[in-house]
Image (cartoon, helix red, strand yellow):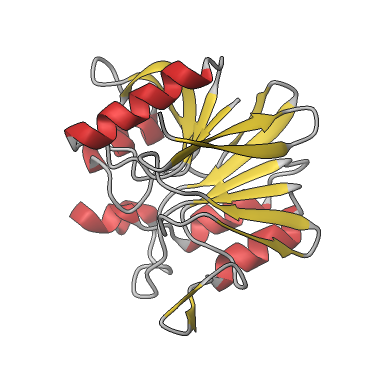
Amino acid sequence: MLVLGDAHADEQSNRRALLAAYEEADADTALQVGDLLYYDLPLPTWFIAGNNENRDIIESLRTGSDSDRTTNVHLLARTAVELDGIRVAGLSGNYAPTQYDKSRSDLQDDRRRHFVREDVERVMELTAVDVFLTHEAPHGLLQSDGYDVGCKYIDAILRNLSPELCLVGHHHEHVESAFGETTIVGLAPVWESYYLLDPETVALERHPSP
């Protein structure tokens, strides 16, 4: 299974790197952790929305009303799916304290990029999750200017779901850690690396971008 970090594939050079990773990996399915920005992909891809996306396309994927604008993309907004014998779940969006307690229907324009309390509560109801995708990091993964970038709501999800593996986007840096019994991997962006996931062992292998 192909695993991809942030793509920002609205830029041509990043799009070339994204599509080259698909070609070299020669996988049947893919996972991607947000900031995709290109929705016409060569094979079925399950992804979470990041803070940089086409908001209208993301909303159409949330509601199941997408038509001609997407190919082979499936949004894990606060949902789970069975893929190759493993259960994969995801939370779309990033955290904003001023928006968290709002209803999703009240988010307007670019504020639609955030997750809200009802999204987190829905994720917390999921069971038997093997791999969890998030655009925000849990605490303990990495620091920026001496500040832990972790989000307490991701911490709570991981404590509740206890997935074997958590894949994190957003920070454009490969970094590994642990949160309880969960292995945490912050993914490098697609112009640096792609990854292969073995569904039998849930082991992740990093490869340089072609």
Q: Nearer the viewer, residue 191 or 154?
A: 191
Q: Is residue 76 visible?
A: yes
Residue sitting at x 28%, y 49%: 52
Q: Nearer the viewer, residue 1 or 79?
A: 1
Q: For residue 36, what is the image quadrant?
A: top left
- Rendered-image quadrant of the C terminus: top left
Residue sitting at x 46%, y 49%: 188
Q: Nearer the viewer, residue 162 or 7?
A: 7
- Rendered-image quadrant of the N terminus: top right
The answer to whether 142 appears left or right of 74 in the picture is right
| Mark count | 0
Please say if 174 is above or below 209. Answer: below
Q: Locate residue 142, reporting x and y percent.
A: 54, 70
Q: Locate residue 124, reporting x and y percent.
A: 66, 54
Residue sitting at x 23%, y 40%: 54
Q: Is residue 108 visible?
A: no
Q: Locate residue 83, reporting x and y percent.
A: 65, 24
The answer to whether 34 appears left or right of 28 in the picture is left
Residue sitting at x 80%, y 33%: 201
Please say if 160 is above or below 49. Answer: below
Q: Locate residue 198, reporting x and y percent.
A: 71, 29
Please say if 197 is above or below 166. Answer: above
Q: For residue 15, what is the image quadrant?
A: top left
Q: Nearer the viewer, residue 14 or 31?
A: 14
Q: What is the residue that sits farthest to the bottom in this orientation? A: 146
